[in-house]
Image: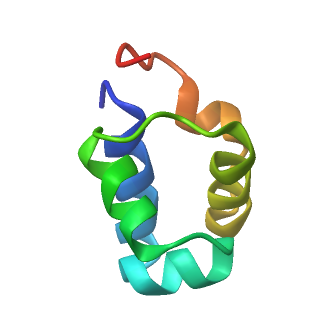
Amino acid sequence: MDSLGARVKFHRLQQNLSVRELARRAGVSVSYVYAVEAGVRGHNIVKLQRIAEALGVPISELWVGDDSK
């Protein structure tokens, strides 16, 4: 996995979460989660931290090797 979006989606699917459920748990919009997973949204560290917490992974797990920055 070489993108942050791919890692978010991987962890979301591993936990059988819908985009809507991840967005709800993270306190972000559904469209934001879709955009992050698609790699079409700029990275907001506060929102990404919330997503990482909702997924139960450290934020570094989402950033490692991200070449889309």
> How are the colours assigned in the image?
rainbow
Q: Which of 4/41 is in front?
A: 41
Residue 40 appears left or right of 24: left
For residue 29, above or below residue 32: below
Question: Residue 4: where, in percent of width, then height?
Answer: 42, 35
Question: Residue 57: where, in percent of width, then height?
Answer: 68, 52
Question: Residue 54: where, in percent of width, then height?
Answer: 67, 68
For residue 49, above or below residue 9: above
Residue at x 61% of width, y 64% of height: 55
**Residue 59 falls in which quadrant of the image?**
top right
**Residue 50 falls in which quadrant of the image?**
bottom right
For residue 47, above or below residue 44: below
Q: Quadrant of the C terminus?
A: top left
Residue at x 74% of width, y 60% of height: 53
Residue 31 appears left or right of 27: left
**Residue 39 falls in which quadrant of the image?**
top left
Residue at x 35% of width, y 69% of height: 13
Q: How many marks?
A: 0
Residue 48 appears left or right of 2: right
Q: Which of 50/64 is in front?
A: 50
Q: Quadrant of the N terminus?
A: top left
